[in-house]
Image: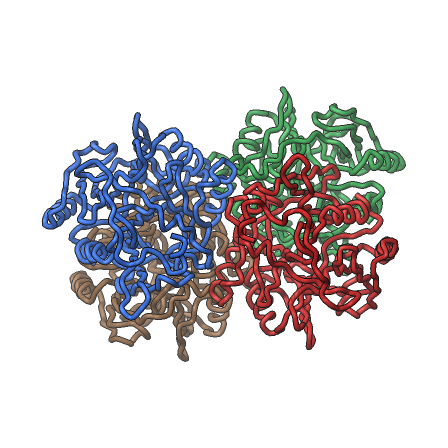
Chain colours: A red, B blue, C brown, D green
Amino acid sequence: MDRRFEIVKAGHIELLVTNLDEAKRFYVDTLGFVLTESDKSHLYLRGLEDRQHHCLTLTQSGTPGVGHFAFRVASEAGLKSIEKLAKSKGVYVRWLEPGEERGQGRALLVEDQFGFPVEFYSKMAGEEWMLQRYQHHRGAKVMRLDHFNIMLPNAASAFDWYVKSLGFGCTEITETEGPKPALWAAWLRRKHTCHDIALTTGKGPRVHHAGFTVSDRASIMDAADILASTGYLQSMERGPGRHGVSNAFFLYLRDPDGNRIELYTGDYITADPDWVPIRWKLNDPQRQTFWGAPTPATWFNDAMLVKSPKTGKFAGLSAPKIRDRPDYLLSAR
Amino acid sequence: MDRRFEIVKAGHIELLVTNLDEAKRFYVDTLGFVLTESDKSHLYLRGLEDRQHHCLTLTQSGTPGVGHFAFRVASEAGLKSIEKLAKSKGVYVRWLEPGEERGQGRALLVEDQFGFPVEFYSKMAGEEWMLQRYQHHRGAKVMRLDHFNIMLPNAASAFDWYVKSLGFGCTEITETEGPKPALWAAWLRRKHTCHDIALTTGKGPRVHHAGFTVSDRASIMDAADILASTGYLQSMERGPGRHGVSNAFFLYLRDPDGNRIELYTGDYITADPDWVPIRWKLNDPQRQTFWGAPTPATWFNDAMLVKSPKTGKFAGLSAPKIRDRPDYLLSAR
Amino acid sequence: MDRRFEIVKAGHIELLVTNLDEAKRFYVDTLGFVLTESDKSHLYLRGLEDRQHHCLTLTQSGTPGVGHFAFRVASEAGLKSIEKLAKSKGVYVRWLEPGEERGQGRALLVEDQFGFPVEFYSKMAGEEWMLQRYQHHRGAKVMRLDHFNIMLPNAASAFDWYVKSLGFGCTEITETEGPKPALWAAWLRRKHTCHDIALTTGKGPRVHHAGFTVSDRASIMDAADILASTGYLQSMERGPGRHGVSNAFFLYLRDPDGNRIELYTGDYITADPDWVPIRWKLNDPQRQTFWGAPTPATWFNDAMLVKSPKTGKFAGLSAPKIRDRPDYLLSAR
Amino acid sequence: MDRRFEIVKAGHIELLVTNLDEAKRFYVDTLGFVLTESDKSHLYLRGLEDRQHHCLTLTQSGTPGVGHFAFRVASEAGLKSIEKLAKSKGVYVRWLEPGEERGQGRALLVEDQFGFPVEFYSKMAGEEWMLQRYQHHRGAKVMRLDHFNIMLPNAASAFDWYVKSLGFGCTEITETEGPKPALWAAWLRRKHTCHDIALTTGKGPRVHHAGFTVSDRASIMDAADILASTGYLQSMERGPGRHGVSNAFFLYLRDPDGNRIELYTGDYITADPDWVPIRWKLNDPQRQTFWGAPTPATWFNDAMLVKSPKTGKFAGLSAPKIRDRPDYLLSAR
């Protein structure tokens, strides 16, 4: 695994919401994210296990979507190496000054060659650990950010970028059927879990969801009960269930603006240097849901638009050249 | 609550299966029922909490379905009172001699006025309690039989029979919408749980499912993982999820013959004499699944045929005069 | 089972506390009991599953202890039968007028022949069911009262009273070792669970604890984490663990005044009319804790004094003639 | 974090047992380790999540203890760097040829300066992943090896070796009280969990225990029930409970020879480069057990002897200069 860039993990994501009060009711009051601080147009949230300023920023916006997502890097030197690499690709990069994003040190904002707004940062302000303050664990008892799942027309090219250039390890892949299988999706990691980022074939650039870790299956079931009791019945898009890929137990939620997050628990540790990627076929009914429950069409149709760091507008979309879902769901398009 | 008939609980059910070996693999090897004994054409199974011979009999048959279901009665006197009551209704009754059903004392087999084969028994042979022999708990860790759910055209008339004549208590009901709501379903109990029998509107007489209690939500999740690993993907028809009615956590399964059982946990205690039935409207999306997940059409279409004690043939079916499912599922008929 | 007296279940208990604010912080804010109402000297609490006014009353008092414990009876006629039976034993009885205990109908208060203040009541005001309002489930998520455990010098005589006179069923017993085993403890029930009342040998009359049902093992573990985070480390007297007797998973707590309650889950259903009591020997190391963990000496030494309905003073204590604990704990007395 | 030596994780441990059949009954039949292969004097076991040959070797021996423990290293180059470093310390090193330890590539065996037999290896044969073959999950459902906990007189010197020389990160420490606090214990990690190795003050060199990860608290509770049902009551030395340090949920077991392992779940992810060690005081009652339950004296008295790679005999023991347990347990020595 290439270590030049010293990326350590998926760090945080900025979701755009149209009503901060509604978003607070969903993320803080109901799901139990910890509110680190807020200003007129932002809420900075962390999980119970986080010792840092935020893993989720909610930003007041006229339109929902994703402002940016960010990887944590071990050192300033790593940031500079990434800047150099990005510039060699001719993409837009911009440095953010310390504090330009609340709680964060100097950071590099990139519009990558696939159109995604990706931030790299090394320093972030420390915050109190809530892990053993159990009286404050509520709702889904969200522990931390786990991963981003992004959707783009050409997963294979992004695979090369993340694995060969940025030094991510590949834990699982999905291929199309047939004699010449194409890479359809990949789960890539820097930290020792199943993934920090997943690449999925579909109209893009879009962010499909951000996954947040909870402690156990009971936390997910409890979250479903609480959401069902508080008027968020429509927020539960898919699950609870067990994934084939990643083996994790999951529940997909749509926030009041339709932004999608995943409650996620129970994947595996991936420290081994000789990890051979687990391979799935796109049409395997146990790939997405190990128990075989069908995935709703919205799961393939909907994803979050991303804001261009260069223009400040949402990125335009391109369609993939290969199909964007299993055969048995093509009719539900 | 009328105590003349001394019915104490849902006691056991006889399911007809076309292949005893296949049925054993499903119920014993996979779900973890305890095999008390077997002969050439029967398997007698009990749960981990049962101290008696069987709560589930599997009988070799050319066609799947239900042979009979049975209520346990506190005494022989109770059986005689029930015989008298049944005869006053002019229905077919027959006494089974001790041992005629393996492990069971003298019993009364009735073809009730709705066409169901219902047995009443008082004595059953004792068996070892497996509850604290944890090394033998496997699969879904099935504890005991909880209830029967039967489907018939006129739930209201069966309601009168069970509540007014047989002395069942009513814990929850479902009514149709509109100014003149009709009783659509009822959950009735003798033991101190949500129900021993549920009555549902639909083409009948059929048995919709038999519900078996497991210890907790984890047992149901574990069962789903095991079923998904052993080729029973298609057996998982609905769930896991939380019911609105009964508040129980559930998973509906179809055995290799299509017979339906429910894994069930987490309802409530109903000893109070002044229990006011919980009322639900048929179209309430949280009634069947508290988390709002849609129920598959098969759940409304399919149920188990019942064998007539009188003729030995399967009972013919009649359709209800009111609709047999919520409005939002009518199109899936 | 004798039904003349129509006792249906353990109904509620009145604990005497020296500081209502402290008691509220423990029972309501930390453990999650629902506060139905309060006045200057009482808090009336119920569980999440209760549909009635209270299962736990906390009463301001100069000294901790038990004001009374109460069984629910199916009808007024049942109350009168109990009055007659009690009077035939020459014990003190007194009728409470409707509302004399908040939320309760006419009730019979008895100082039984063993010195315990036992109330029998039939009517109680209805309250909102919180079972499916999951957003309000907190702390230990207490569902309902399950049982009383009382301590007295002569368990055998109380056994006769509860079983032969009041019609309780016996589910489990503990006997002393040796050629002439003496009854040391008994678990007795009216509702279909392991027990409504347990009788234990020891200095008495005292109430050892009141047991409250929670949904699952996770609720008990979560409660331990929360108690440990909020300054109640000393409140956790024993557990979490698995009982041999009752098979339940438990945690024993001492409230800020030293009153003892149990969080309890996972016993079994006892509707069968031919239940044969499970028998344990006093010295069996798995009897109290199935996993073998030793019970602290305080568990045998401490219990709650009870208030005499006749004198309003705490009842004096007598010692048992047989030993009050297993041999292996005699040295810890 | 120093990456020259490319240590990736705690890899496996060799426990010496006096009866392989008894050991198999404990580890495989009861706890659910997967048997990869065996020969006359060894069992090679792995966890359900492992994709490699073994994480636990049981070796027939006249005396219980630890043969060696091993860290996995990312590459052969890493092994050579470690050889060079070890030789610079003047300690005994020996190369094992591929296959000399079954399933393993070329490996470096070191008797470190503290007397511990530590192996470093890079290659190991791949094996089938049992993670999604749920029908084979049994007992404690052991997932993988998590960490070693070693006991030695001078934890501070080993801290320098592991952190400054070998490049481990420090996640938590325990210090003695007083104006000049001494390092009493440290939790050190290479993979992104709380620890791969813990250093504890005590008579040594000894291995206190090896920790194995299970999926959730329920797996630990289930294991306790199973152990209690199969004659292993005495095997449960401490727990189940919650640790203060690591926040993990635990159960300590002694195998039939007295070797100690831990079932462990629920610590946290430690990918962040700026992790500030959590600090505990030795006398804090919540440090070892967050719920305050006292630790038995055996936990401080007993640990596993280690075999010298140089002499093949068990290493002699030295006592620490500072006390080896909290003040409140000194009397139990």
Residue at the top extreme of this rendering: D40
Q: How many dots with numbers?
A: 0
Residue B307 percent across, percent down from the top left: 24, 39
Residue at the bottom extreme of this rendering: C40
Observer-nearest of D241 and D144: D144
Instruction: Let me know if residue C100 appears in the view.
Output: yes
Residue A95 percent across, percent down from the top left: 84, 64
- Which quadrant of the figure has residue C182? top left
Q: Residue at x 78, y 30 (%)?
A: D107
Position of A187 with respect to A327 (left or right) is: right
Observer-nearest of A192 and C281: A192
Position of D206 with respect to D139 (left or right) is: right
Q: Residue at x 17, y 61 (%)?
A: C85
Vertical comparison of A6 with D121: above or below? below
Vertical comparison of C303 with C97: above or below? above
Position of A252 with respect to C286 (left or right) is: right
Q: Quadrant of the C terminus of chain D?
A: top right
Q: Residue at x 82, y 43 (%)?
A: D166
Q: Residue at x 46, y 39 (%)?
A: B139
Instruction: Let me know if residue D240 appears in the view.
Output: no
Residue B323 percent across, percent down from the top left: 31, 58
Residue C309 percent across, percent down from the top left: 29, 69
Vertical comparison of B193 with C183: above or below? below
Observer-nearest of C285 and D323: C285
- Which quadrant of the figure has residue D78? top right
- Which quadrant of the figure has residue D261? top right
